[in-house]
Image: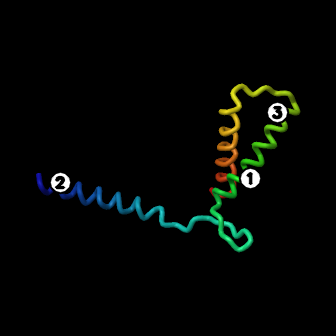
Amino acid sequence: MNGNRSIRLVRYGLVVSSLSLAGCQRAPSFDVLGSFFPAWLVCLAAALLLTVLARWMCLRLRIPLAPPILIYPSLTALFTFALWFICFR
């Protein structure tokens, strides 16, 4: 029984160590006026602009949006994730 337990411990140890090393990759970043910003921050800023544009289009086309407190943050998140997946697969 001790041999089975030690094999299981070794397997779990290998899995945990490989998962912890999988994230050791350089994060994408942009150089903006000499400072490096993470790519997700750039995607978030672009998503905010796209959300404002979507709001303007909805107002212009007279499309009623039910609870705006849920719609606009959701649109921002949708645009952020979409930009991230499009630009940084």
Which element is circle 3 on?
Answer: helix
Find the residue positioned furthest to the front: 69
Q: Position of residue 78 (x, y in %)?
A: 67, 42
Q: Which residue is mark 1?
A: 46
**Identity, as a three-letter code, of the amino acid under mark 1:** Ala
Q: Which mark is residue 8?
A: none
Q: Which residue is mark 3?
A: 58
From what the image shows, is residue 50 above or below residue 30? above
Which element is circle 2 on?
Answer: helix
Q: Which residue sits at x=65%, y=52%?
A: 85
User: Could you classify mark 2 by the number of other residues whose Cα lies within 10 Å: few (under 14), some (14-19), or many (20 or more)?
Assistant: few
| Scheme by which the image is coloured | rainbow
Q: Earlier in the sequence, mark 1 or mark 3?
A: 1
Q: Nearer the viewer, residue 33 or 79?
A: 33
Give the number of callouts.
3
Q: Is the residue under label 3 in contact with that under label 2 (CB below 8 Å)?
A: no
Q: Nearer the viewer, residue 21 or 32?
A: 32
Q: Nearer the viewer, residue 18 or 24?
A: 24
Q: Position of residue 53 (x, y in %)?
A: 81, 43
Q: Nearer the viewer, mark 2 or mark 1?
A: 1
Asked if residue 2 lies left or right of residue 13, the reply is: left
Q: Position of residue 20 (x, y in %)?
A: 41, 61
Q: Which residue is mark 2?
A: 5
**Identity, as a three-letter code, of the amino acid under mark 3:** Cys
Q: Earlier in the sequence, mark 2 or mark 1?
A: 2
Q: CA distance from mark 1 to mark 3?
A: 18 Å
